[in-house]
């Protein structure tokens, strides 16, 4: 019996001696204790939680090397493998989780929308419900700060830059001819339907090294990856009709949109200042095919075709019978993209885009025909080394072949054009020092075959989150862009134009509201100049141009603080001068407004089952040259004012009746003046105001969604 008791005593002692204490303290980056952190040994039931002092203590019978895990919400999980005997008196500092919703974001100069955007300033549905946008992506973006109102043109003019300085990409691939062609003082529209896109990134400066060949801005449109339902959309409008359909089978889906627009019925009711020999008409179609593979990789093929026809005589003070202009345009755009995960936390994105654009123009009795074939090949690799360090790099090639033919009356045709290949490579890192401090550093190199020129562009952005709602950001970048086709087709002995961006941003966000203020400075160099009234064969070209642009952009948006009401306010101040094109001296260009203001509001009236919208746009006067006075660009037009209204009535869950009117007050806006080529007997030059074709534009439409999902209704679009 004594022997048995002795053995039992020894075994009990061994059991006591084999238990090890695990102890320590858990604190945050400011050395403040973290209460309630979860602490345990991986693969066991041994563990505890930290107390009010951040301390923990528990015992384990495990031996040898063990892995201790410490986790807490909004902090990175701490993992350490060590001999169990050494896992005591630990002091563990948990790092902020940089992937949380309240973590810092790099956003200087950039507006993002979509499901993955942490802060949304403009939702995709705003494109179709903003009164002044009339369903156009570009129209909605022109309510954001940094853009200038050039209503007779319709394209994006950003922070003192020409429209050609903004480049547009679909799924990361270049769109070479994104605008529908039009006549002078007849605003253009974007070619692409907003219903096929899930998100938008609009950068007004300081953008990623992934994008090049843009001096002012990039607009990235991302198509929908996986549609959530099969449906058919039908729209009948005062100016045309459209139909769209989405089909889903297995891991495949196909979305198609088509539309036809003809202004003849509208012009019969509301004649404008032109004599229309052939009213504006267009036919367009888009399709997106998607296939998801077993490994969740995705292939997307996007295609778009459009045909535009226009023939009119416009009033012109220098032509007794008016100025004749006719245009026929055919455009094809194809975009194929593929993305996949490879290896250990690597991702690959690659794609090809191709554009074929053909135009036939009649300018009085002369004829001009041109054809552009362009392609973009791109491959990009991304690696997530940790939640704090990400690397992306890639290469791309742009190929352009432009041919133009000019035929004057009783003359032979003259053919001219150019070929150009641009090879580019880029690398960029995202570094998160904490959830309050992050940096993005990138470099881009480009070689242009037409100039045999290599350019190098550094880019850097910093962001600091001061508190839960406030963030400061800085950005710097160098940007290069080849001269536009209208110059290169006449002269290829040029260099790239370039500019430097400096941006400082402050952003304050709360639930359903955002405030942004951003200051910037742009320095332009090597801008193209020529010595003739218009660029032509006999012009002398150079890169002697220069300029600057500086200003402040302010944005405020609030949703539901006023019941059933969503509104935003944008204001931009711009100070800019350039010496470029045929300018005799540096001056503020005639496409620039010093002050731009947009106010957009939407209110849902439950009793009427209606959404009522309003958009007000203001722009200060733009410069023009008055030859009756001395100086260049020596006068300014009167201020631009426009109030647009829309009303959407929900007939039932899947039908909407939509009505809108642009410039509802019929304000007589003046975009500039044409002057007589020769003076009168007193030596004065008579002038004619450049006015919009119609003081107001009315639009009525009926939209019908046919879907098996009855809960998926048109109310979501309001």
Image (tube, helix red, strand yellow):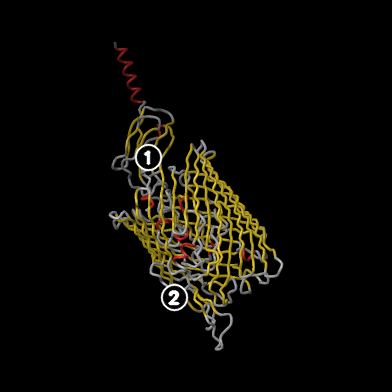
Q: Are marks 2 and 1 in contact (CB under 8 Å)?
A: no
Residue 193, x across and y down, in percent = 48, 53
Q: Which residue is mark 2?
A: 638
Q: How many marks?
A: 2
In this picture, is 115 found above or below 136?
above
Secondary element at image label 1: strand
Which of the two discs, 2 and 1, labels the residue nearer the N terminus? Answer: 1
User: Which one is nearer the viewer's eye here, 591 or 380?
Assistant: 591
Residue 374, x across and y down, in percent = 62, 55
Q: Which residue is mark 1?
A: 71
Q: Mark 2 or mark 1, which is nearer to you?
A: 2
Q: Residues within 10 Å of mark 2 (few under 14, many from 20)?
A: some
In this picture, is 228 found above or below 10?
below
> Is residue 364 visible from the viewing direction of this image?
yes
Secondary element at image label 2: loop
User: Which one is nearer the viewer's eye here, 531 or 108?
Assistant: 531
| Quadrant in which the N terminus appears | top left
User: Which one is nearer the viewer's eye here, 93 or 116?
Assistant: 116
Q: CA distance from mark 2 to mark 1?
A: 63 Å
Q: Residues within 10 Å of mark 1 (few under 14, many from 20)?
A: some
> Is residue 157 visible from the viewing direction of this image?
no
Residue 321, x across and y down, in percent = 57, 75
The circle drawn on residue 229 is none
Looking at this view, name the residue that lies furthest to the right: 412
Residue 633, x across and y down, in percent = 52, 77
- Quadrant of residue 464 in the image? bottom left
User: Which one is nearer the viewer's eye here, 656 or 389?
Assistant: 656
Using residue 110 as the reference point, say whether residue 564 is left or right of it. left
Looking at this view, name the residue that lies furthest to the top: 1
């Amino acid at each position: 019996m004594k022997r048995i008791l002795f053995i039992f005593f020894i075994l009990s002692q061994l059991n006591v001696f084999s238990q090890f204490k695990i102890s320590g303290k858990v604190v945050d980056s400011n050395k403040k204790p973290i209460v309630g952190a979860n602490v345990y040994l991986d693969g066991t039931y041994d563990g505890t939680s930290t107390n009010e002092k951040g301390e923990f203590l528990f015992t384990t019978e495990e031996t040898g090397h063990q892995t201790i895990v410490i986790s807490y919400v909004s902090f990175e999980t701490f993992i350490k493998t060590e001999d169990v005997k050494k896992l005591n008196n630990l002091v563990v500092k948990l790092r902020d989780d940089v992937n949380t919703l309240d973590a810092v974001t790099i956003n200087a100069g950039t507006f993002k929308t979509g499901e993955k955007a942490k802060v949304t300033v403009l939702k995709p549905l705003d494109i179709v419900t903003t009164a002044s946008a009339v369903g156009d992506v570009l129209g909605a973006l022109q309510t954001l700060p940094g853009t200038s109102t050039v209503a007779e043109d319709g394209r994006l003019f950003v922070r003192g830059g020409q429209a050609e300085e903004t480049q547009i990409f679909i799924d990361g691939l270049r769109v070479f001819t994104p605008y529908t062609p039009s006549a002078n003082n007849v605003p253009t529209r974007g070619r692409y339907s907003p219903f096929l896109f899930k998100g938008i990134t609009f950068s007004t400066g300081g953008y990623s090294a992934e994008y090049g060949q843009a001096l002012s801005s990039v607009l990235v449109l991302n198509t929908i990856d996986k549609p959530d339902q099969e449906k058919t959309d039908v729209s009948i409008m005062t100016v045309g009709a459209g139909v769209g359909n989405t089909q889903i089978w297995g891991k495949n889906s196909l979305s198609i949109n088509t539309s036809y627009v003809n202004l003849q019925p509208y012009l019969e009711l509301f004649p404008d200042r032109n004599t229309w020999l052939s009213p504006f008409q267009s036919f367009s179609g888009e399709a997106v095919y998607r296939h998801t593979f077993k490994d969740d990789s995705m292939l997307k093929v996007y295609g778009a075709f459009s045909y535009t026809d226009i023939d009119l005589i416009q009033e012109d003070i220098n032509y007794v019978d008016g100025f004749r202009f006719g245009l026929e345009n055919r455009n094809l755009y194809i975009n194929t993209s593929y993305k996949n995960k490879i290896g250990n936390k690597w991702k690959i994105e690659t794609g090809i885009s191709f554009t074929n654009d053909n135009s036939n123009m009649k300018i009085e009795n002369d004829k001009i025909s041109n054809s552009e074939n362009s392609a973009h090949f791109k491959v990009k690799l991304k690696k997530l080394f940790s939640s704090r360090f990400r690397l992306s790099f890639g290469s791309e090639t742009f190929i352009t072949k432009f041919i133009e033919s000019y035929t004057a009356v009783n003359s032979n045709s003259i053919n001219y054009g150019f070929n150009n290949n641009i090879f580019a490579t880029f690398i960029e890192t995202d570094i998160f020092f904490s959830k309050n401090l992050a940096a993005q550093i990138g470099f881009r190199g480009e070689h242009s075959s037409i100039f045999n020129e290599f350019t190098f562009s550094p880019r850097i952005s910093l962001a600091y989150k001061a508190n839960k709602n406030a963030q400061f950001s800085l950005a710097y970048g160098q940007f290069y862009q080849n001269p536009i086709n209208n110059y290169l087709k006449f002269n290829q002995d040029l260099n790239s134009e370039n500019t430097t961006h400096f941006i400082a941003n402050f952003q304050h966000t709360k639930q359903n509201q955002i405030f942004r203020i951003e200051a910037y400075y742009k320095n332009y160099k090597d801008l193209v100049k020529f010595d003739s009234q218009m660029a032509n064969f006999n012009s002398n070209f150079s890169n002697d141009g220069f300029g600057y642009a500086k200003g402040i952009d302010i944005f405020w948006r609030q949703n539901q603080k006023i019941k059933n009401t969503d509104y935003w306010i944008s204001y931009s101040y711009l100070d800019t001068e350039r010496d470029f094109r045929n300018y005799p001296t540096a001056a503020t260009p005639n496409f620039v407004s010093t002050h731009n203001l947009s106010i957009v509001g939407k209110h849902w009236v439950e009793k009427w089952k209606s959404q009522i919208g309003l958009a007000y746009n203001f722009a200060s006067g733009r410069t023009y040259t008055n030859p009756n006075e001395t100086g260049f660009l020596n006068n300014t037009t009167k201020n631009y004012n426009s109030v647009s209204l829309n009303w959407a009535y929900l007939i039932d869950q899947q039908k909407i009746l939509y009505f809108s009117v642009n410039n509802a007050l019929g304000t007589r806006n003046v975009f500039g003046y044409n002057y007589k080529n020769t003076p009168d007997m007193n030596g004065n030059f008579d002038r004619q105001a450049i006015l919009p074709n119609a003081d107001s534009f009315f639009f009525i439409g009926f939209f019908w969604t046919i879907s098996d999902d009855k809960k998926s209704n048109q109310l979501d679009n309001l």
